[in-house]
Image (spheres, rainbow, N blue to C red):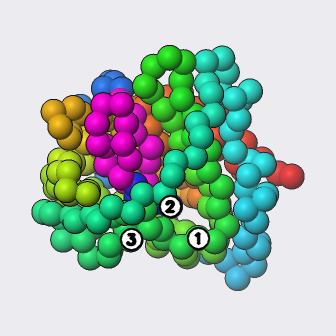
Amino acid sequence: MRVRIATTALGITAALLVVPACSTDTTGSTHQTSLSRTGQPTGSAHEPAALTSVELESRLLDPRDLGRGYLPKPARTAQHDHVTVIGCPALSALGGDAATGGTLTFPNNAKADFTYGNSSSEISEELYSDSVEQLSGGIDRIFDAMTGCPNYQVVAGGTPVEVTSQQLPAPHVGGDQQWSQLLTFTAQGRSSVVKQTAVRDGNLLLIVSGSPALVDRHLGRALAKATAAG
């Protein structure tokens, strides 16, 4: 699960755990103030073994699942700019890695990025597998830090990026725990809006991020494929 500083055609966009999405579609979320998560961790002494990265890879959405107009996006070159978080002590306390592409270290993971048509809209899917305790605590920590700071600034490679975060109602798509938030990034006079939704189902964590409309459209499909047996 990653925090990235990414360069888009519209300038520098900071994106926590997500790919940049230049859509400004915020329908239904303008005045939401509900808690961003639901559910409680429910680990078991008989919890199944974590899925391997290879197994997770097979459960990711592909262009055939998404439909016409979606194309895989090549992986980004790793960024190593120095990053400073200003105005959000909770996020700063997570350490430098949390603001520059570091991870909550879930060793079993898989990821896919897609662009939609000729637009700048994007969607990203990430899958992780670990113990229930590790997954629940890890994602909770990040979401609490983000949504606890409605306004803060990230300075990446000398470029300041204003960030606003907004809790959204957790989605009713199944799973044991759910989280959701809306992030707006403003840099060099341009803004980018990203929706990020996470669902934990047992020892599997799904994160879908990107253009709000695309996240809403494909979240259920992503969860169904990720949690399908076999």
Upstream in the sequence, badge 1 or badge 2?
Answer: 2
Indicate the position of residue 7 as horizontal and vertical percent values.
Answer: 36, 42
Label 1 with label 2: CB-CB less than 8 Å: yes
Q: How many marks?
A: 3
6 or 121, which lies in front? 6
Q: Give the secondary structure at mark 1.
A: loop
* Relative to 95, residue 28 above or below: above
Amino acid type of disc 3? Asp
Q: Amino acid at mark 1?
A: Phe
Kindly report which numbered mark, 3 or 2, lies closer to the viewer in this rendering. Answer: 3
Q: Position of residue 56 (x, y in %)?
A: 73, 56
Is 132 displayed left or right of 182 in the figure?
right
Amino acid type of the residue that numbered disc 2 sits on in the rendered structure? Met
Asked whether the beta carbons under mark 3 and mark 2 sit within 8 Å of each other, the answer is no
- Find numbered disc 3 in the image and state the secondary structure of the residue it sits on: helix
Q: Which residue is mark 3?
A: 97
Q: Residue at x 62, y 50 (%)?
A: 111
Residue 1: assigned label: 2
Counting residues from the start of the chain, the first of labels 3 and 2 encountered is 2
Residue at 55% x, 69% y: name it: 135
Residue 141, placed above or below residue 180: below
Task: Tell me if I can see residue 71 in this picture.
Answer: yes
List the residue tagged with mark 1: 106
Q: How far apart are labels 1 and 3 at the CA level?
A: 14 Å
Instruction: Give me the C-alpha separation between circle 3 and circle 2.
Output: 11 Å
Span shown in magenta: 5-22
Please, what secondary structure does the residue beneath circle 2 have?
Answer: loop
